[in-house]
Image (tube, rainbow, N blue to C red):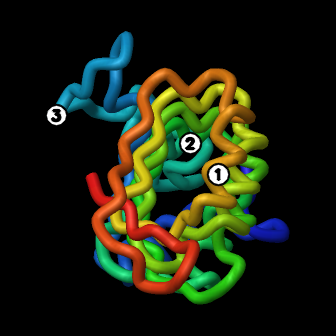
Amino acid sequence: MASRAGEHPAAAVEAFRKVRGSVLYDYQFSAGTYIPKAKPWAPARLRSAIGDEYFQEVTQVTLGRPVTDATLAHLEGLDRTESLSVFYPGPGDGLKSLHGLTRLEEVALRGRGVDDAGLVHLTRLPRLWKLNLRDSMVSDAGTVLLPEFAAVSELSSATRRSPTPGSHRCSG
């Protein structure tokens, strides 16, 4: 599996770690439950010879510190990702990198870069059932998109203050 225009998944993971992000892999979960001391199923010798990425898939990404569009672009090919938490201060078009992550089920986004234009990219995520838009800049106009999130059963956001007319800062 490749990310970002043929990029190897290891490069994406390294990019996330450079910004103090973290990833979890499919073998670290069983029936949706996290297993802290889980080990990859493939023998260590084989994994070291050809690389871990052939035996595991990134399923969870956490980017808790501010990230840029370039960092978010590394998500593009990690199409097995099911859970994503991002602090995106923007400005930019970084959330477009999420539109191909069709297995995403849980998304937590915070920061000024999370706005109406970015929300459009999330409407294309068919499995998304949990959405948290904490400290975002989604306006009244952006909330019109919420009915397009047909599978979302949990939505977290609350208006705290309006930094500009028509914009609401959402907090969780």
Kind of residue indicated by mark 3: Pro
Structural distance between the alpha carbons of marks 1 and 2: 6 Å
Residue wearing tag 3: 36
Q: Residues within 10 Å of mark 3 (few under 14, many from 20)?
A: few
* Residue 52 image position (x, y, % from top left): 50, 49
- Residue that appears at 71% across and 78% down: 93
- Residue under circle 1? 78
Residue sitting nearer the eye, 10 or 112? 112
Using the image, determine if residue 115 lies above or below residue 45. below
> What's the distance in space between the residues labelled 1 and 3, CA to CA?
22 Å
To which residue does mark 2 refer? 81
Residue 96 sits in which quadrant?
Answer: bottom right
Residue sitting at the far left: 37
Q: Position of residue 128 (x, y in %)?
A: 59, 32
Q: Are marks 1 and 2 in contact (CB under 8 Å)?
A: yes
Residue at the right extreme of this rendering:
5
Q: Nearer the viewer, residue 112 or 6?
A: 112
Q: Kindly tell me whether residue 46 is visible in this rendering.
A: no
Q: Which disc, if any, is residue 115?
A: none
Quarter of the image where one finds residue 25: top left
